[in-house]
Image (tube, helix red, strand yellow):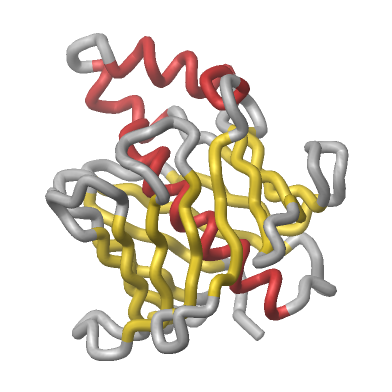
Amino acid sequence: MLQYPLTLNFKLIALAPRIRVTDATGRLILYVHQKTFKLKEDVRIFADEAKTNELFRINADRIFDFSAKYHLSESATGRQLGHIKHRGMRSIWSATYEMYDANDQVTHIMTEDNPWVKVLDTIASNIDIIGMFSGYFLNPTYTVHRGTDKEGEGVLKLSKRPAFFESNFTIENLDPNLTEQDERRLILGIIMAVQMERSRG
């Protein structure tokens, strides 16, 4: 079992974000590398920073499309674990991601807790000086809910932490009964969602 909270850290100025995922003890558990200059998203997830042991892959099913599916798979076997996608136009106002299992069934959704943070962040980022500090004061949170709407039980919470010139997120476990299979799939989905939301500072 993973030791929570997990921390996701990456530099904002990097051409291709390399995310370090550590557990509560500071131990590196995942190292995420997104390939650059690819027409489709291609994310590789390793057990180490040297990238000697590839564990998972995340691949988009189409080129630069808001409705793209991001497939999650095991690198060694190619076994499909599920996929994640935006929930249509709703994500323009409040970031919402549907998380599917290997049988193409929606099992969870990830929703932004307060969409006004996105609105304020968008406004602030377009104002000189103020925009430089928006990433420190405007920090969204997201909850992964069981089922197909946000009325379902919360199982994981993603929170952005104040930081300059980098992004720090933490993942908390809200459900001690979360299965290892779901935990793995949902964390991979969260990693992809963070990639898609990273432009917000």
Expressed as whole percent of the image width and height from the top left, the position of residue 131 reads 26, 20
Q: Quadrant of the C terminus?
A: top left
Q: Please tell me in which quadrant of the rendered image residue 82 appears.
A: bottom right
Instruction: Determine whether, in the image, residue 113 is placed left or right of residue 47.
Output: right
Seen at 58% across and 50% down, the residue is 158
Expressed as whole percent of the image width and height from the top left, the position of residue 146 reads 80, 52
Expressed as whole percent of the image width and height from the top left, the position of residue 77 reads 46, 87
The answer to whether 3 is drawn above or below residue 201 in the figure is below
27 and 84: which is toward the camera: 84
The answer to whether 4 is drawn above or below residue 134 in the figure is below
Instruction: Determine whether, in the image, residue 196 is placed left or right of residue 149.
Output: left
Seen at 84% across and 74% down, the residue is 177
Q: Count up the numbered dots.
A: 0
163 and 121: which is toward the camera: 121
- Evaluate whether residue 201 shows in this view: no
- Evaluate whether residue 114 shows in this view: yes
Seen at 61% across and 33% down, the residue is 87
111 and 67: which is toward the camera: 67
Q: Please tell me in which quadrant of the rendered image residue 102 appears.
A: bottom right
Expressed as whole percent of the image width and height from the top left, the position of residue 185 reads 60, 67
The answer to whether 32 is drawn above or below residue 147 in the figure is below
129 and 192: which is toward the camera: 192
Instruction: Determine whether, in the image, residue 173 is placed left or right of residue 71.
Output: right
Seen at 45% across and 79% down, the residue is 78
Q: Quadrant of the N terminus?
A: bottom right
